[in-house]
Image (cartoon, rainbow, N blue to C red):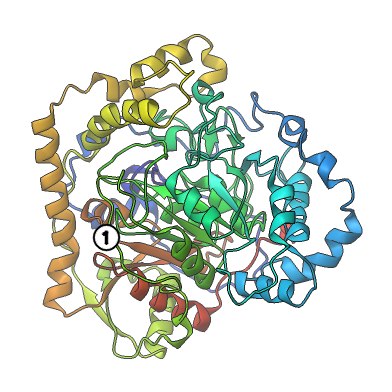
Amino acid sequence: MRNTFFLFILIFVFSCKDSKSLDISKPAEETEIAETEVDSLITNESTSDLSAISTKDFRDFKVLDSENLAKAEIWSLISPQMSGFKEADYNRLKPLVLEQDITTLQKHIAEGKFNYQELTKFYLYRIREFDRENRLSLNSVIAINPNVIKQAYKLDEVDDYDEIHPIHGMPILLKDNVNASDMVTTAGALALKDNFVEDAFIVSQLKSKGALILGKANLSEWAYFFCGDCPSGYSAIGGQTLNPYGRRIFDTGGSSSGSGVSVSANFCAAAIGSETAGSILSPASQNSTVGFKPTVGLVSRSGIVPISSTLDTAGPITKNVMDNAILLDAIFGEDTSDAKTIYAIWEPGFYYEKIKDASLKGKRFGAPKRLLQDTLYANALKVLKQQGAVIVEIDEEKLGLPNFLRLLNLDMKKDLPAYMEGYANKDIMLRTVSDVMNFNLKDSLKTMPYGQNLFKGIADDNGDDNYLERIKDTLKTNGKQYFDIPMKANNLDGFLSINNYHAAFAAVAEYPALTVPMGYTSKGEPKGLTFIGKRLQEKQLLEWAYVYEQASKARVAPKDYN
């Protein structure tokens, strides 16, 4: 649940060279805002609190393929079940499945063009073909549900397609910090290699609507809040996740790196990520997908390996906005075991049923003046204007996020033991951050090749509960004011950003944010237009993003994976 550029983008040194990935004709000449410029957008930040977070070049990899997980191990139980699915079957389904939205997949199934079992095998075939131990390896998938083909077979017995939720039968990958039966939940760490558990609340939500849990996606270990000197997308279990638009060239984003990459590469119908401050927005934008960080509490956090009970949330990552609305509709719901749960009275279909009727006419959006120099962003604003939106150029509030890192330290110091006690496998004796650190020291080359500096910072932080509450109050006030003041002054409906540039402010305000592809730099690197709204404005964000997406048609699939 950690931002791509090491929790917040404020200190990440961003550079990319010699992209050979995306073949987009007539790339526009452009001006880009580098990550190093973004820190000037957010003034008065207490940079001393960020000193533990690395500015290491993300291409400086010590590990690529996992040294703790072989491809054969992932496929040992599932490959025998795939024996009847041949290359000819894959090629027949390819034009019907690749880059198609969930609504279209359900239409094909209702028409008898293929069934849920074949759809599942299609994605499994692609993962096995592309994801590990070959020249196109992405290392985005960390585990396969050994029972998913059998479960798909049972779903094929449905005979009334009008009565099912659109997520029914759709193969979904979960970030591997989300508990799910039939598979281990590791958070990418060897310390949790035997963490066999029951379903998290959101997994039960998905299954109750007929979704298929295809497997687990790789992630930045412990949602990146662990090493500080490692690339995003690395975990001891899963190895180094790579970006399909530029392997070893472009950052994957983190910490939901495997979720973003697997969706972009068409390894699943959709995926679940989690975010503390940018960890959905970042990999979604970096991999040209749609990522949604909902209002904290709309989606349950129970049974998800935590960083911060204050800020954490799960959310959907998909290829398009409609699928995002469908997946959000499937996972939201009141969970009385989650202290921040929201009792939402929305009926099923609330987020997706009328999305095609959305309009931007008269909607007012704030655009930070300093972002206007980014050509892709400026072009996105033109598209919004053409759809009837009003763009208001705004100056950003001079507010910082003091002690942000200490909030994460103090939350995880208590939240990790709570997870281990309440949701982890009872045979695992580890409870605290210090316990995990001591475990890692037994074989540091396998468990922490990049060190564990952020965990050390957690263990060393002696702030008490009163201090933590004061930090929370200050951060939430600053986060809300950062958006509320310009929105009120200019009568704005929403705030427009790039990628995860304002993720930390949205996080502490507990406001929803959604990123949607807005194009590619001249080097082929994806970027996203990010909509930020007020509490529980998820439906509006989805509608705005849908109109923009349909007008811009910006997403292009990564060419080497078609």
Q: Judge whether residue 454 can be spotted in this image.
A: no
Q: Position of residue 284 (x, y in %)?
A: 49, 57
Q: Quadrant of residue 350?
A: bottom left
Q: Residue at x 10, y 32 (%)?
A: 467
Is residue 5 positioned above or below 72 on the image?
A: below
Q: What element does badge 1 sit on?
A: loop
- Residue hosting label 1: 511
Q: Quadrant of the N terminus?
A: top left
Outermost residue to the top = 442
Q: Residue at x 12, y 38 (%)?
A: 469
Q: Quadrant of residue 387?
A: bottom left
Q: Residue at x 43, y 47 (%)?
A: 201
Indicate the amino acid at tag 1. Tyr
- The number of callouts visible is 1
The foreground one among 61 and 279 is 279
Is residue 444 positioned above or below 493 on the image?
A: above
Q: Quadrant of residue 461?
A: top left
Question: In this rendering, would 251 be left or right of 74?
Answer: left
Q: Position of residue 406 (x, y in %)?
A: 21, 33
Q: Residue at x 52, y 31 (%)?
A: 186
Q: Quadrant of the C terminus?
A: bottom right
Q: Judge whether residue 453 can be spotted in this image.
A: yes
Q: Position of residue 143 (x, y in %)?
A: 64, 38
Is residue 77 positioned above or below 364 on the image?
A: above
Q: Position of residue 261 (x, y in %)?
A: 59, 51
Dot 1: within a 10 Å radius of its alpha carbon, few (fewer than 14), some, or many (20 or more) residues? many
Question: In this rendering, would 407 be left or right of 88?
Answer: left
